[in-house]
Image (cartoon, coloured by chain):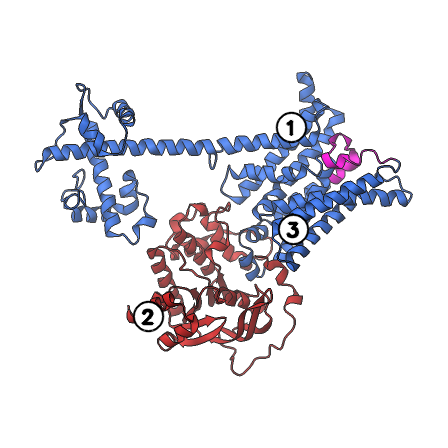
Chain colours: A red, B blue
Amino acid sequence: MHTESLSGQGVFPARNTEPRPEHPPEVPLAIHDLTVAYQRKPVLWDIELNIPEGKLVGIVGPNGAGKSTLLKACLDLVPRTSGWAHIYGVPYRKARHRVAYVPQRESVDWDFPVNALDVVAMGSYRRLGWFRRVNAAETKRAMEALDQVGIAHLAHRQISQLSGGQQQRVFLARALMQDADLYLMDEPFAAVDAATEQAIVDLLRRLSGEGKTCLVVHHDLATVTSYFDWIVLINMRVVAAGPTAETFTRDNLQKTYGGKLSLLEKAAEALRSTPR
Amino acid sequence: MPGLSEILEVLLLQNYNTRLVVLSTTLLGVAAGLVGSFLLLRKRSLMGDALSHATLPGIAIAFGVMVALGGEGKSLPALLLGATLSGVAGIATMLIIRHTTRLRDDVAMGFVLSVFFGVGVASLRMVQNLPNAAGLESFIYGKAASVVMSDFLLIALVAGVASLVCLIFLKEFLVLCFDDGYAAAQGWPTLFLDVLLLGLVTAVTVIGLQSVGLILVIAFLITPPTAARFWTDRLLPMLLISAVIGGVSGWLGASLSALTPQLPAGAVIVLVAAALFLVSMLFAPVRGVLPRLLNQAALRRKEDRQHFLRAAYEILEDQAGDAPVANRSFPYEALLPKRSWTPRQLRQILRVARREDHLEPTPPGRLRLSEPGFGEAARVTRNHRLWESYLIQYADVAPSHVDRDADMVEHILGAELVRELEAKLGGTLPGQTVPPSPHSSGER
């Protein structure tokens, strides 16, 4: 919540961010030695990760495993205790224009006095810079983005009058406005209807078809194999990362979810039902 | 009681004695309406309350220091500077509590509010016996009549700058208030924007201390935007309406108070704002309570009408058997069990149907649809069945997409899909042909 006090220089002291051979600069997202702690309790330990370009990547793990925190740490939204995350070889603050972030839908108040188009237009604010108002050209782009997620007809509807799935589409349209190369999405499939889920999957496939990289926090084990090319299994540390077919194994899931039987059952079911 | 001419004189700023007072509270109201909107949307209303209470120690201490330095003591800019400093100290205390402990925000605010106010009351008592201290306590409840030209200029300047900053930073404040995480990820300096916003709140609070008083100034910040929210769903209109409500409250409130000297301006201003809030809450067309109730009632009447027509049509279908459905009379008793309505509700529904000429005059106990009523019943039944069939066939997408209003079926689904659904349901002819109910053959 209180991100404002965290972005000052003091929280992110200068560190050795020299490029390292195991993290080549052309990688969309390279994470080295990343540790994050909230109130003395570590949330993420020693994360080492290279996310390959043009892939649709799922971040999978149990509740409280640090999935959202991983995204936020890459975006300088939470302080890092150690390590760094580089976007195409440079720190995030130098690569903001190449990254689009889709926060969790519940993170905002949907009874805010704006309509869908206003929210999508926020994706142009960075481009516009200080004090410049949203102009006709950006409004047109925002309409196009809404059209791409299939809700152009709802552009002028107040956001509280949208269904959960439509609200999620608004957030995606706002990210599309940024014309980024790397998309970080926090649970875009949470509590959306089937049609929206399909629309989001189509959109993600199209983005990765255009060579964009998408990193998606995901919690539904049953759909992992059908949605993602590549997965990162985390539970405070990276349990496994790699192409879905090789990484999404019973053994790795056991390591990620531990002895939580009900979840393992679900996973076993998911494995049996692949490919869908 | 003041006469009409006197009232007009005050309201139209013709009265020299009250002109400055009324004008200053009006400008204050406009600024409070604008700044308060963002304070409300940032969900920091309580912080504004803590801030205004935290100004009191600064007033007393500034007075004491000025007297000690040999000054006259009651210079307004010096007192307001003291108020600003202790207000900022209050906010700082709150932020320190928030970031160094795990106490919740409301605890931190309650703590700062009461402790700083307590310190203020104590230090006020301590400087009370110094010469010329009378009237210091008027900062608690406000005393608009004490505004002189130099005070007015200060208030006008600060209010003007605060209003301007709100409009200049519109886009930046919007993204901060709506989604601070996204704003930070986009590289907007959220800390700076938050400090700027709190600075504006502090400025408006401090210039409001003299006329409205530190206890009531928070109402002046919060009531106008809350009232404005009922009238609109967009930010810019909300800001402007809020500014108007704030300005009108300041203008009317100070005028009323000037006409009846026993009423303190701060209280009257807040009461005027509260009255405008009440009117907005009840009557505002966008989110007001009354328009919403009326809408709901209209919706229910429409549902009742459609339910009745459909029930009547289904009875006629049963009567016709395999023959084409014809408009005949049917017994009242057949209608009652069709739905969950009580006899009294049904009588009311039938009264409406007669008024709309959907029913023909019949002997008691029998009912017969009129020609237009029969046509309407066929249409409503057909559309309803199309919806049902759509919901069944597209169960995965439909529930979130569909507004199941029988009148909207073609508008929402499009002629193509309607034809397809009709074909699936076995209704071969376009137009008024009523397809069979999608679940009539089975369970019913």
Residue at image mark 1: B252
Camera-nearest residue between B429 and B80: B80
Q: Which residues are drawn in magenta?
A: B132-156
Residue at image mark 2: A268
Mark-to-mark CA distance, 1 and 2: 71 Å
Q: Check chain identity for marks 1 and 3: say if they share one.
A: yes
Q: Chain of mark 2?
A: A
Badge 2 amino acid: Ala
Is residue B214 visible to us here? yes
Secondary structure of the residue carrying tag 2 is: helix
Mark-to-mark CA distance, 1 and 3: 36 Å
B197 shown above or below B181: above
- Among numbered discs 1 and 3, the one appearing first in the sequence: 3
Mark 1 or mark 3, whichever is nearer to me: 3
Secondary structure of the residue carrying tag 3 is: helix
Q: Quadrant of residue B193?
A: bottom right
B442 shown above or below B295: below
Q: Chain of mark 3?
A: B
